[in-house]
Image (cartoon, rainbow, N blue to C red):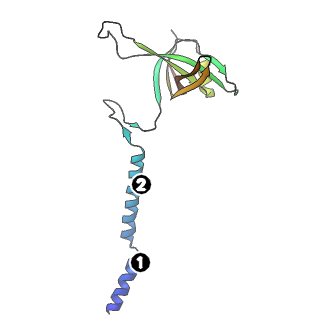
Amino acid sequence: MAAMRSATSASTKATPTKATRTAATRTAATRTAATRTAATSTTGSPGPGRAGVVQGHNEVVLGGRVSGQPTVRVLPSGDELVSWRLVVGRDNRGLSPSGRQLVTVDTIDCVAFKAGVRRVANRWIGGEVIEVRGELRRRFWRGAAGAASRCEVEVLQIKRIGAAR
């Protein structure tokens, strides 16, 4: 009889029960969720009214006025791009501690490679109020004065908010 009980318990240990399988599945799901959370961890404190920033995330959203007519360039590779400058107002208005007037706008270089965005931008005359969504890029090149670089926004989506003034 004792031999029979030990044989029965050995076979029970060899094949997991439904409860054991369910617990193992839950543990694996918890590990997967923890890994996913670690991969998308946030950095810094987001501050009031801001969402947390995911590491490795590059998204720019700007609203402002187009400073002038966009320019079209054809690169040596044959690719076409349209570039323009976007004038964006700053929140800080007034005087510096030394009494000088603070700069109230920033001028941001924007560039579009996507055909749809290029078509829309080509119709502008300057002065339009727009919203752009894209990614910040730093371009490097070698000029007559040596190596140079510039930061610009590669625009992926664009929306016209107001007419030209």
Query: Which picture quadrant has residue 141?
Result: top right
Q: Residue flagged by tag 2: what amino acid is it?
A: Thr
The reply, left or right, for residue 63 in relation to residue 48 is right
Q: Nearer the viewer, residue 24 or 109?
A: 109
Name the image quarter holding the N terminus: bottom left
Q: Residue 158's x, y, as percent?
A: 53, 25
| Residue picked out by circle 1 | 14
Q: Which of 73 and 165 is in front in this view?
A: 73
Q: In this view, does 158 lie above or below 21?
A: above
Look at 32% across and 10% down and name the residue there: 96
Q: Residue 48's x, y, as percent?
A: 30, 29
Q: Residue 94's x, y, as percent?
A: 32, 10
Q: CA–CA distance between discs 2 and 1?
A: 26 Å
The reply, left or right, for residue 122 in relation to residue 50 is right
Q: Which residue lies furthest to the front in this view?
A: 146
Look at 35% across and 7% down and name the residue there: 101
The reply, left or right, for residue 31 in relation to residue 125 is left
Query: Which picture quadrant has residue 120?
Result: top right
User: Which tag, 2 or 1, sits closer to the chain's start?
Assistant: 1
User: Could you say whether the residue bearing mark 2 is in a helix, strand or loop?
Assistant: helix
Mark linked to residue 32: 2
The reply, left or right, for residue 139 in relation to residue 48 is right
Q: Is residue 18 above or below residue 75?
A: below
Q: Residue flagged by tag 1: what amino acid is it?
A: Ala
Q: Callout 2: 10 Å neighbours few (<14), some, many (20+)?
A: few
Mark linked to residue 151: none
Q: In this view, does 52 lie above or below 62?
A: below
Q: Residue 149's x, y, as percent?
A: 54, 23
